[in-house]
Every structure is written in structure tokens, then in C-alpha cells.
Image (cartoon, rainbow, N blue to C red):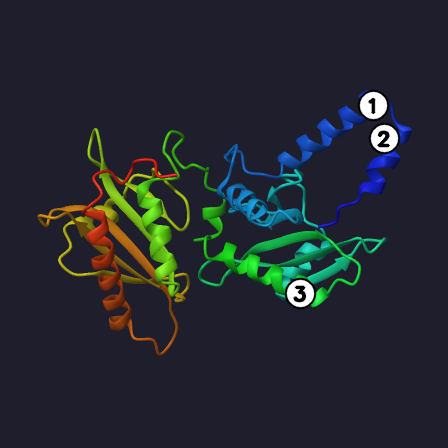
Amino acid sequence: MKIDKTRTRVLAARVPKCAVAALALVGASAALAQLPASFPVKSYAQELVDRTVAQHPDLRAVVMHVTPPNAADNVVIASNIGRIGKPADADDLDVIATGKPHVAMDQGNKRIEIELPLHDVGGQTVGSLGLVWRYPVGGNHAEFERIAGVIRDALSRRILSLANLMDPYPFTPLVTTKSRAQTLVEEALQRHPEVTVLALRARVQPKGDLVLLGSTFGRHGKKADADDMKVLDATAPITGVYSNGKRFGVDLPIRNRIGVAIGTLNVGYAYGSGQDAKALAAHAVALRDELQTRVAATPALEEIDP
């Protein structure tokens, strides 16, 4: 990722304003042509960028480079500086290929850019993340690299997979992403930092559909599939290994005060050789039981809880 203001100023000085605008439109159209036709107006990736900018107002630029599913080219899919669809440059691709961060300064040593590999929750590389700060006099490269790593790791905890980044946000246009269910998920994550994935589904009116109301990966309002529906009637935890063997998942029903299943909980943990699957499943059950006491006291998990 290179942010070159000089080239833009020179172009504007030599070409009439109407021609500059036309060139910009042509460039934008060419860039957007690199994205799938189904690319949403606002993607989940863009939501993650927006959150990052809000949490770190000192950042000048945040850019995600990803190769969309079934696409040939790596492009910008989300940023706070536009350029959506712009192909990645050599530095971006090198970071993804080698897994090594790239650090650069602009010509006046006034800005520092750190590019590093972006991972999903299972540790798979899904693209690259570019971060730019103003560089203070006497600044410390190592400290900026440390902060960049912290930001990247926080984002990775919110990315289920490469395809997840391409989801529309919100997944269903009229659903709230700030539900009571989402609040319960966020609070549970604070108490249980070992959890890597958490999703809470519940039946909602008027039809009683089972939908996703709170999660670590967006998709609010997504209706349950057949496998999710099976969880409602499960008498024991349903477990599985995902993300190429790097994530252990547990699905459990959540019940109300009288024992009727009103929703489901999906809990994920980092997983590797030598880990005790039974112990992880037991931890998930304990988390469900803890959360269930709060869910039972909440009449409508889909209600807005800002």
C-alpha cells in the first residue's frame, strides 16, 4: 500500500478539473471491476475497518488487501481512504507470501506505514492489513510495530474466514447489530478471553425463526440452517473441528426457565495436537450454563441494547 499525494497534486496542476474528474471516474470503475459482482455496498470487512478507525483515532489510514473467493487478483476490499477494488502492489503481495511485516517511511519521514499479514480466527492468512500513522519526532519504530500487531490480532479474532469478510453488513438490512444478544456475547468474551468464536441464536417473532442475534463475526439476522436447527433438540454437546484443524467448536441449546430450548450457542476454541477435546466441551457447557442464567432473564434477545 502506497499513499502518494505528490502524484495527485501534479496531475491536478496539468489537467483541467473536468478531465481530472473524468479520469477519477474511469479509475474508480476499473478498480471496482476487480471485485465480484455480488460485493456488498458495505462489507463486514469495511465494518471492521470503521471500528478500528473509531478505536484508534490517531491512525491516518487502514487498508485491507484480500483476494476475494473465486477471484484472480488481490485488491483493496475495505479502507478509510477509498480505493476499493485497487489491485495490491508488490509490497502487499510480499507480506502475504512471506508472512513478514513491511515497514516504510514517506520521503519526509512524517508518516510510518506498517503492512502485516491478516489472519482469520484459526490463524489462516486471508490477506494483508496496512496501517499508517503520523510519525512524531523521536518516534520509535518498534512501538508502532507492536501496536500494529495488537490491532491486527484484535481484528483476527473477529474474522471467521476469508468469505466472512465479504459478507454484507448488516447481513440482513433491517436487523440491529446492537442487540441484547450482542451485549451478552461481548460481556462473555471479556470474562472468557480463551474463547475464539461465540455466536448466539434465538427464535424471533413473528414466525419464530431461529436467527443469529449476537456473534464475534457479524452475520446478524442470518437464518439458521439445518445443522443449527438440530442443536435445539440436542441432549449432548455437538462438537467438531474446523479451520483446518485449528478450531474446536461446540454447539449447545440454550433453555429458558422452564427448560424449553429457545436458542443455541456456538463456542469455539483454538485447537491443536495434544489438547483435550472433552475438557474444551466441558468448558463450553459451563459457559452456556453461565450465559443461560442471563438469557433466561432477558425476554427479547433481539431488542436494541446500545
Residue found 89% across the figure and 30% down from its top: 13
Q: Where does label 1 land, which residue?
A: 17
Q: Where is residue 216 in the image (x, y as percent from the top left)?
A: 40, 51
Element carrying mark 1: helix
Quadrant housing the C terminus: top left
Alpha carbon separation for disc pair 2 and 3: 37 Å
In this rendering, would 76 be left or right of 247? right
Query: Who comes first in sequence, dot 1 or dot 3?
Result: 1
Element carrying mark 2: helix
In the displayed structure, 190 sits above or below 205; it is below
Query: Who comes first in sequence, dot 2 or dot 3?
Result: 2
Give amino acid for label 3: Glu
Give amino acid for label 2: Ala
Alpha carbon separation for disc pair 2 and 1: 7 Å
Q: Which mark is residue 143?
A: 3
Alpha carbon separation for disc pair 1 and 3: 42 Å
- Counting other residues with Cα less than 10 Å from the Cα at mark 2, is it few (<14), some (14-19), or many (20 or more)? few
Q: Where does label 2 land, which residue?
A: 12
